[in-house]
Image (cartoon, grey):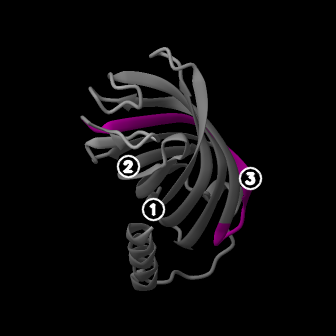
Amino acid sequence: MRKMFFFVLAAAALLLTVPAQNAQAQSQSEIPKVEIGAHFTLLRFSDFDITDSGAGGRLTYNLSENFGLETEFNFFPQARFNLANGSSLTGSRRTQGLFGAKYGVRSEKVGVFGKIRPGFIRFGEGSSPLGASATEFALDIGGVFELYPTRPVALRFDVGNTLIRFGSLGGGFTSNNLQISTGVAYRF
């Protein structure tokens, strides 16, 4: 959580350094269609009592003022995974890919959205909770809060439940996992 605090603090500092533009009403045709962003993310593997931090990128295409299609990739560099029973596995890193939609309301300076994004999480050799490499189904369901200090800049805060189906290795269970992300995007 300490890393996230410093990231939010850095995002706020960035917000203060961005020059203000003239206040003009944004019509639907003025909503930027494309957003490219980078973010910091925390993923809490609740069934295994571990929190992983990582970084990622996101691409959004806004079809309208209220609806956008998104793709997001995250990389978790820690080469470890702890099991709930106290044993530990060392191995490679994890990669996550999510593809879906967001829908909500937006004003000139703020947007609030719901999101649903199916995808995958790839556990490398030895880093899966079950010991072997695997690619597991993931589904991110949650909310998004965006701030628009200027037309080309967006600050984004995500909170979601990332469901992971541990089934390809014979575990046969679904895990609910809190995922929080904060980042900045360029909109054009």
- Across and down, in percent, residue 96 comes to 42, 37
Residue at coordinates 61% horizontally, 57% vertically from top-left?
A: 31
Residue type pointed to by label 2: Gly
Residue at coordinates 46% horizontally, 45% vertically from top-left?
A: 59
Q: Do the residues labelled 1 and 3 touch (CB within 8 Å)?
A: no
Task: Give the overall secondary structure of the magenta segment.
Answer: strand
- Across and down, in percent, residue 78 comes to 28, 48
Residue type pointed to by label 3: Gly
Q: Residues within 10 Å of mark 3 (few under 14, many from 20)?
A: some
Residue 25 sits above or below residue 156 on the image = below
Which mark's residue is nearer the viewer, 3 or 2?
A: 2
Of the residues under marks 3 and 2, which one precedes in the sequence? 2
Residue 112 lies left or right of residue 9; in this view the side is right
Q: Does the magenta stretch include residue 138?
A: no
Residue at coordinates 51% horizontally, 20% vertically from top-left?
A: 171
In the rendered image, is residue 66 in sight?
A: no
Residue at coordinates 49% horizontally, 48% vertically from top-left?
A: 49
Query: Where does label 3 land, which residue?
Result: 104
